[in-house]
Amino acid sequence: MTREIYLDNSATTRPFPEVVETMTEVLTEYYGNPSSLHRKGMESEEKVDRVREDIAKTLRGKPAEIIFASGGTEANNLAIQGVARRYKNRGTHIITSSVEHSSVLDVMKFLEGEGFRVTYLPVDENGRVSVADVEQALTDQTVLVSIMYVNNETGSIQPIQQIGQLLSSRPKTLFHVDAVQAYGKIPLRVKEGKVDLLSISAHKLHGPKGIGALYAREGIDLVPLVYGGGQEKGKRSGTENVPGIVGFGAAVRKVFPQLEANRSRMQALRDLLITSIRDSIPEIRVNTPAENAAPHIVNVSFPGVKGEVLVHALETEGVYVTTGSACSSREKKYSHVLKAMGLTEKELDGAIRLSLSSETGETDIHEAVRLLARIVGELRLLTRR
């Protein structure tokens, strides 16, 4: 059997054994509805509240500021739509970047249909937004700025703290950060970054799928997306996903005590991956910036090779990578992120993303690059015939 080398951790990660064990225990023993008044309900509620506290500590926020949702997409939707509708009387202008995840960009397009005006900021060749561009785009009608922390395709880190400082003198303009790719990889401090709303997801840090959270600073009101029983202080109705929440908590409790060690280790592996690809394969372009990049994402273009073909060829050898965001890679269109960074058509066509986790080893890197070099060489030879 071919040994599997999983390098698509930005799409999802394998749940830790502790996560699976904890969720199983909750499913079989702590199955009460957290809204029920009896002991079984209170036991479940206590489990949920403990995770709320654990997540709040990682962000240096308050437990009451954590709203559970079905994942990063819902958290982004709740933040953006919730703010836009609640504070429409302040203004109808929103600022975002041209390289956001689809769960942000598609919401922006939807809100444009409701009469909001959206400014999509450009990025430089490293995929970074200019703080000066943010400042220039601000108007007295700007109700929200939404900028991702780490780009899910290239790993570029945006200047969140500087943008937060810029907005700190504008209390009527709220700041939302999609931190799905940053949470559990780099330190996040919502107060230091002057962040008002921040989205996170469990399955990006070895937790379960179908659960995420939104940090919403105390004092911010949101128009809900879902109405019903009034759970999550009326911000997100529906019976809480207790197994998912508890699994999220188990992942958080394992990841965060080791965050700095894992960050250093993944960064070393990322650098090894980039160096090994450069040394082994000619005519490439590394799209992940050399500085201000997350430790777990590497995006590379192999001109003369179709990224989609390369993904499937690597899969036959047990190596799992992708062409871009898992949410849109099946649509078979060029990455809007890489287009915004100014790549040529051949560079766009031959781009793939490799993403690491704390479980990735040095042996995985060497073997993946060996197979990658062989396959790229074979595919280029075929296209030149």
Image (cartoon, rainbow, N blue to C red):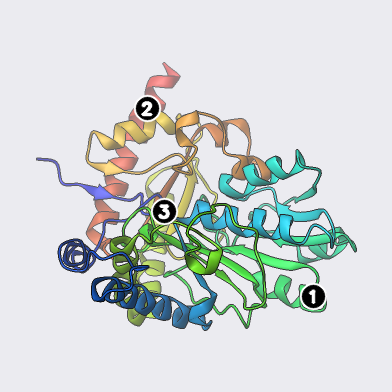
Q: CA distance from mark 2 to mark 1?
A: 55 Å
Q: Quadrant of residue 289?
A: bottom right
Give, as a three-letter code, the residue at label 3. Ser
Give, as a three-letter code, the residue at label 1. Pro
Which is nearer the N-term, disc 3 or disc 1? Answer: 3
**Residue on which the image places disc 3:** 10
Q: Quadrant of residue 76?
A: bottom right
* Residues at discs 2 and 1 in contact (Cβ within 8 Å): no
Image disc number at residue 171: 1
Q: CA distance from mark 3 to mark 1?
A: 34 Å
- Choose between 210 and 203: the one closer to the eye: 210
Which is nearer the N-term, disc 2 or disc 1? Answer: 1
The residue sitting at 48% across, 44% down in the picture is 325
| Left or right, 331 with reference to 313 | right
Q: Residues within 10 Å of mark 3 (few under 14, many from 20)?
A: many
Disc 1 is placed on an element classified as: loop
* Residues at discs 3 and 1 in contact (Cβ within 8 Å): no
Residue 65 in sight here: yes
| Left or right, 305 with reference to 254 | right
**Residue on which the image places disc 2:** 379
Which is nearer the N-term, disc 2 or disc 3? Answer: 3
